[in-house]
Amino acid sequence: MSSIITEPLVSKIMAKKTASKETAKDIKSKAEAESDALELPSSSAEESQSDDGEEESASDDSDSDSDIEVEIEGDSDSEAEASPAEAKGAQSKHTVVASAPSNKKTANKNKNKPGVIYIGRLPEGFQEHEMKKYFRQFGDITRLRLSRNKKTGKSKHYGFIEFQHYDVAKIAAETMNNYLLFGHLLRVHLIENENIHDDLFKGSASRFKVVPRQKISKHLHDKAKPKEKWDKLASKYEKKKALKRKQLSQKGFDFDLENI
């Protein structure tokens, strides 16, 4: 198994090897001193003792090397085990969880405020009374205005409704948009409070009345006038008649307009 050996670990291994060699030398020197004190053994005994000493030193060296190899393998295993944990920890440190933006502030801001919706493509005959009766199923209506022509009083087929609660207006807009009503696909949209004009519901409290302009003009024309007014109108008429006679004579038409 391949492993990465650091400098402190190499120095530790070398120290153990030198210590084992020193112990082997000490054992050999003691054995030689004891053999000198006693009777000199035969050459075969000396060879056997030297062989035993070399085997012991070799065994010590092998034991120390095996211990070192075990420690090295243990270090590599610990490093292998620690590397996934460290990688996981490093990954967890750099992991960013993006949270969705919350609309709590906007919801709380509009919670206690009224909501206004725009309604377009209204069918013919679907006027204020019908609008209020139909959209009342969603919630309480505070104000309603149907846009009309100022001269004729006819509907322009769009209007505005203000509900008491903003959430109710939002639900009504989502529900009624693209709703088929008497062959017309309604267009319903929610209007934000900051986009509402101050005069949007001007005159919504009173019922729209058509101004009878023809009747008013006829009454002003036929009512009694003072003598000064009649003289002014007569002089104006004579001037226009003289101008017309002059224009006709220039074109070759010479006849008296008094007899016409």
Image (tube, rainbow, N blue to C red):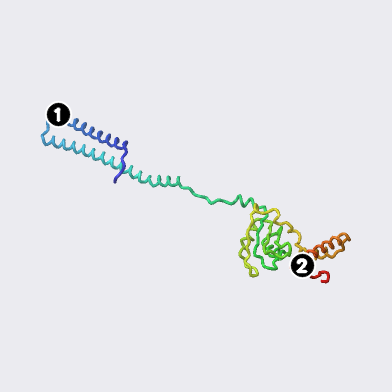
Q: Position of residue 35 (x, y in %)?
A: 15, 30
Q: Position of residue 110 (x, y in %)?
A: 64, 52
Question: Which residue reaches farthest right?
Answer: 227
Tell me if mark 1 has few (under 14), some (14-19) or many (20+) residues whose alpha carbon lies within 10 angstroms of its own: few
Q: Position of residue 149 (x, y in %)?
A: 71, 63
Ranked by sequence position, the earlier of labels 1 and 2 is 1
Which picture quadrant has residue 256?
bottom right
Q: Position of residue 74 (x, y in %)?
A: 32, 43
Q: Amino acid at mark 2?
A: Ser
What residue is shown with label 1? Answer: 36
Classify mark 2: helix, strand or loop. Answer: helix
The quarter of the image holding the C terminus is: bottom right
Q: Mark 1 near mark 2, Cβ–Cβ under 8 Å?
A: no
Which mark identifies residue 249? 2
Left or right side of 141 for 17? left
Mark 1 or 2: in front is 2
Tell me if mark 2 has few (under 14), some (14-19) or many (20+) residues whose alpha carbon lies within 10 angstroms of its own: few
Nearer-the-camera pick, 39 or 57: 57
Which picture quadrant has residue 40?
top left
Nearer-the-camera pick, 215 or 206: 215
Whether residue 10 is situated above or below residue 216 in the rendered picture: above
Classify mark 1: helix, strand or loop. Answer: helix
Question: Which residue reaches farthest bottom?
Answer: 260
Which picture quadrant has residue 190?
bottom right
Nearer-the-camera pick, 148 or 182: 148
